């Protein structure tokens, strides 16, 4: 039995976190979510919709912005982004061709020159420095090993404009016993949970120079989520 199964000691900001680490290899994520693309919308609406809707509200999208969604999935949030920003630049990336195909189906009726959906990695964003007004990221960091998180957050900060905004939703640690059911499932079978486990990222964002404005907890069908609003600047 390895250390990550029992708990992972992660040193951050001089503190020691004891959390489950990611147990599905990053190179396997794309194929794993290809296999879940056909059913993901049902899961998303039953367990994630309240947190995702709150993230869109906190984003306060203004038409004409440059918006990037990393880990766009089946487009549950991205379709709302494009509708709210028809005259801006909307870019969505994901590792899973199957999830992107579902997203493209959702956006079929919208102006094709208002958005771009493509394969892409959070570890290397193909965008210039200081080019993004708003970056959204839903249910991805709960798949990422602790050791790799800072690299991704560095990329987020690099592409955000000085006054840019970051809105994130993650599976988080449950705040009551019932909501910890999903952690138990993850311990038994990480793939059943899509490789996702509960994380708490506010401190890590601050460590990487991002200004956390708020962190909210949501629980839907016992599934726990955190919604974080952060700014690229430190003011």
Image: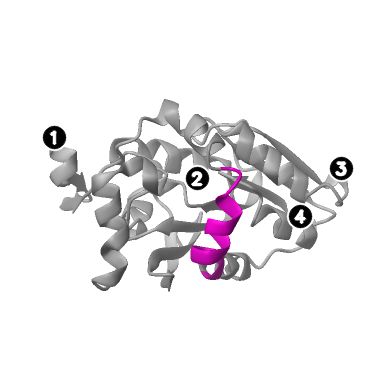
Q: Which of the two labelled residues, at mark 2 and mark 1, occupies the earlier sequence position?
A: 1
Nearer the camera: disc 2 or disc 1: 1
* SS category of the residue bearing label 1: loop
Query: Does any portion of residue 164 appear in the rendered image?
Result: yes
Residue mark closest to the camera, 3 vs 2: 3
Disc 1 target residue: 2
Q: Which mark is residue 157?
A: 2
Q: Nearer the viewer, mark 4 or mark 2?
A: 4
Among numbered discs 4 and 2, the one appearing first in the sequence: 4
Horizontal relation, residue 184 to residue 127: left or right? left
Q: How would you rate the neighbour count of disc 2 (Cα within 10 Å): few for under 14, some for 14-19, many for 20 or more?
A: many
Going from N to C along the chain, the mark reached first, 1 or 3, is 1
Q: Identify the residue under disc 4.
A: 82
Q: CA distance from mark 4 to mark 3?
A: 11 Å
* The magenta segment: 37-50
Asked if disc 4 and disc 1 are in contact, CB closer than 8 Å, the reply is no
Q: Are marks 1 and 3 in contact (CB under 8 Å)?
A: no
What is the distance, in whole Å, between disc 1 and disc 3 at their CAs?
A: 49 Å
As measured in the structure, the alpha-carbon distance from the residue carrying label 4 to the one carrying label 1 is: 44 Å
Which is nearer the N-term, disc 4 or disc 1? Answer: 1
Residue 50 quadrant: bottom right
Instruction: Tell me the crowding category of disc 1: few under 14, some 14 to 19, or many 20 or more residues within 10 angstroms, Cα based.
Output: few
Q: Is the N terminus in the top left, top right, bottom left or bottom right quadrant?
A: top left
Mark 2: secondary structure? helix
Q: Position of residue 36 (x, y in %)?
A: 53, 42
| Residue ID for mark 3 | 113
């Amino acid at each position: 039995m390895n250390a990550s199964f029992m708990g992972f000691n992660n040193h951050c900001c001089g503190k020691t976190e004891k959390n489950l680490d990611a147990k599905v290899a990053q190179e396997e994520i794309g194929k794993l979510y290809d296999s879940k693309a056909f059913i993901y919308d049902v899961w998303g609406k039953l367990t994630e919709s309240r947190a995702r809707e709150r993230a869109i509200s906190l984003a306060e999208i203004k038409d004409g912005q440059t918006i990037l969604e990393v880990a766009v999935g089946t487009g549950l949030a991205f379709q709302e982004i494009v509708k709210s920003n028809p005259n801006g630049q909307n870019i969505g990336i994901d590792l899973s061709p199957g999830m992107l195909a579902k997203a493209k189906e959702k956006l079929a009726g919208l102006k094709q020159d208002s958005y771009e959906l493509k394969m892409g990695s959070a570890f290397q964003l193909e965008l210039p420095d200081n080019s993004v007004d708003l970056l959204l990221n839903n249910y991805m960091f709960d798949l990422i090993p602790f050791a790799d998180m800072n690299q991704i957050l560095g990329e987020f900060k690099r592409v955000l404009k000085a006054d840019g905004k970051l809105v994130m939703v993650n599976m988080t640690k449950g705040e009551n016993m019932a909501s910890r059911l999903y952690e138990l499932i993850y311990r038994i079978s990480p793939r059943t949970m899509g490789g996702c486990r509960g994380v708490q990222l506010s401190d890590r964002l601050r460590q990487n120079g991002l200004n956390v404005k708020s962190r909210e907890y949501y629980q839907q069908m016992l599934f726990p989520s955190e919604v974080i609003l952060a700014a690229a600047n430190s003011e």
